[in-house]
Amino acid sequence: MNGKNNIAIGFLTMGLFMAYGFLLIYLRDFAPGKEEWINSYSIGKHFESRLAHVHGNLFAFLNIVVGYLLLQFSDRLKNVKTISYLALTGLLMPMGILAEIYLGAPPVFVLIGAIAMTVSVIWLGFSFIILKLNNDK
């Protein structure tokens, strides 16, 4: 795994969360009881669903960027596979929020995903610092 899966899954995930955005627009503008939905803007399921939508698209985009960078620099970076898997595991965060909203799942998936994505981004950042330092020698 050298980044191609991150790019493919990133685009697919982004498409799904973009489509989820259409559901949110429907709930806000057209659904029966839309006033109740609008009034709960900053609390409950409304707030959580917006968090999932935003983080889903952000984490999908991060996977696309991480995947691209891993592909371009895979011959010069260490731990490419681990960084790739961590970024993909990060998608558990927005999926976990949706699982909480619709399935009553515990927040463990949100935490695992958030930690995994954070570690992957920081690890990749340090990898590029090390690459730069090695190239400056």
Image (cartoon, rainbow, N blue to C red):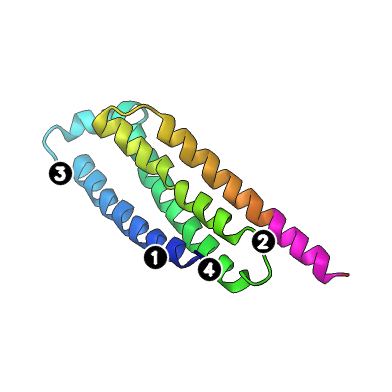
Q: How far is mark 2 from mark 1, CA to CA?
A: 22 Å
Sooner in the amino-acid sequence: mark 2 or mark 4: 4
Q: How far is mark 3 from mark 4, CA to CA?
A: 39 Å
Sooner in the amino-acid sequence: mark 1 or mark 3: 1
Sooner in the amino-acid sequence: mark 2 or mark 1: 1
Say which mark, if any, is on residue 68: 4
State the extent of the magenta-drawn residues as a range.
126-136
Q: Position of residue 54 (x, y in %)?
A: 41, 46
Identify the residue at the far right of this view.
137
Q: Which residue is mark 2?
A: 78
Q: How far is mark 4 from mark 1, CA to CA?
A: 10 Å
The image quadrant that residue 31 belongs to is top left
Q: Nearer the viewer, mark 2 or mark 1?
A: 2
Q: Nearer the viewer, mark 1 or mark 3?
A: 1
Amino acid at pointer 4? Tyr
- Whether the magenta-drawn stretch holds residue 134 is answered as yes
